[in-house]
Image (cartoon, helix red, strand yellow):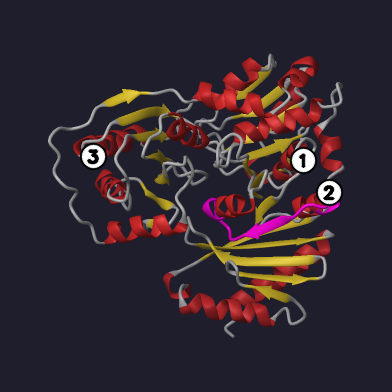
Amino acid sequence: MDELIVSVSGLRGIVGTSLTPEVAVRYAEAFLATLPPGGIVIGRDGRASGSMFADAIAAAVMAAGREVLDAGVAATPTVGVLVQEHQAAGGMQISASHNPPQYNGMKLFSAAGRVLTAEAGREVLARFHEPVPLPAVAAPGGRRQVDGAPAHVQRVLARVDAEAIRRVRPRVWLDAGHGAGSCAARLLFEALGLEATIAGGTPDGQFEHTPEPTEENLAGMLPQIAACGADVGFFQDPDADRLAIATADGRFVGEEATLPLAVEAVLEKTLGPVVVNCSTSGMTAAIAQQRGIACHVSAVGEANVVDQMLAHDAVIGGEGNGGVIDPSVVLVRDSIVGMALVLERMCATGRLVSVESLAADLPQRVMLKTKVPLGPEARGPGLAATLERIAAAFPEATASRLDGLRLDEGTTWVLVRASNTEPIVRIVAEAADLAAAQGAIERATGAMMSAG
């Protein structure tokens, strides 16, 4: 498992082995070579190795004659906001997102304050694999500290009915996971006048649980919500671009409910197209259909969702992993606007509506996810052959190869695709009931493990 994972969306690796400061600098220099003149925003999540990588990358940026806008510990969407606010040439977020603590990585932003398009990412990737020295400069650039949280929160406040939230004042519990999310979240709760309990609010990377915000990983945290008398529980991943939700009594609503709840909040005020990726729950598409608006589907990956949002002038979009993308704030998955939109839904009627009630009103689906390690022998042609075996196991299904293999069979669908960030295959199935979803997973995994 110890190999550098490099794709058009960024890179990740285990610190000190596959990922070293030298590797990070080479990747940063490949990125700089593709950019127009201008400053570069550098942010990081709370991982202990983050400052080491930030310093090494900042030195390379300054050596290239560019100014470093040092955001310090900052949420990934905050970095996008800073790129826009300072009209920077680009940005780099040092984070391994939900990966375990031994990992770190880098995510790249264009001058538009969004993650790189696939085309731009491929150019960086080519330069990374065949590096060309950057041209000499007359003088190095400088480095200054910038705080993007206030501007980020102001954009979020402008997006929601802040006065409605202030009047109802729901009590909030947040697990920031010792990542970067507490910085902007604390400002948001203060601006809304909310009583908030923040667990894991010190951004030091000392994770109290496996950082991916799934029900299994968060089981030990859920009782804290009721213990402090909160009305809602929120969970961020380490770089705060994903959001999971729980009820007042500690029942996990999950990541897949985040986007449809946010979509309902936006569509209550502004009707317009919605974009999701092909692994996202059908709840959002059903909500769009109820309102007579289009729900467009992209390949998996934040950049792909953003591309489709821009192409269709979408008012909201995102991914089912808890990633809400609101173009009125920033074209980045954003747990901060996700929380604000959910709070707005809870307070829109002038009285507190429970998360449990809001979730119960969503179109009901059952989704199951699993993952299978992907060895080198199973990639490339090996994976293609595996996908064909899986397709043959669903002879009545409609197949889509937009991203991996998706098979739709009535109200049931299953998606099998290789991860962009880990050496695994992800299998996702959704159906009207648990038995059907389990059956789809079993058929897909059985075909995957078959010798042919």
Q: Residue at x 36, y 36 (%)?
A: 49
Q: Amino acid at mark 1?
A: Leu
Q: Amino acid at mark 2?
A: Arg
Secondary structure under tag 3 reads helix
Q: Residue at x 64, y 53 (%)?
A: 312
Q: Nearer the viewer, residue 249 or 76?
A: 76
In three-dimensional space, the C-alpha distance between marks 1 and 3, rounded to whole angstroms, equals 44 Å
User: Mark 2–mark 1 contact, CB under 8 Å?
Assistant: yes
Give percent across and percent down for residue 293: 78, 52
Q: Residue at x 47, y 61 (%)?
A: 423
In magenta stretch: residue 237? no
Q: Nearer the viewer, residue 152 or 294?
A: 294
Q: Is residue 290 left or right of residue 232?
A: right
User: Mark 1–mark 3 contact, CB under 8 Å?
Assistant: no
Q: Report the residue marked by disc 2.
A: 291
Give percent across and percent down for residue 337: 63, 33
Q: Report the residue marked by disc 1.
A: 267
Q: Nearer the viewer, mark 2 or mark 3?
A: 2
Circle nearer the N terminus (2, 3) = 3
Q: Is residue 24 left or right of residue 239?
A: left
Quarter of the view holding residue 377 = bottom left
In three-dimensional space, the C-alpha distance between marks 2 and 1, rounded to whole angstroms, equals 8 Å
Q: Nearer the viewer, residue 157 or 396?
A: 157
Quarter of the view holding residue 232 = top right
Q: Residue at x 35, y 45 (%)?
A: 15
Q: Which residues are magenta?
A: 289-304
In magenta stretch: residue 302? yes
Residue 60 badge: 3
Label 3 environment density (alpha carbons within 10 Å; few <14, some 14–19, many ≥20): many
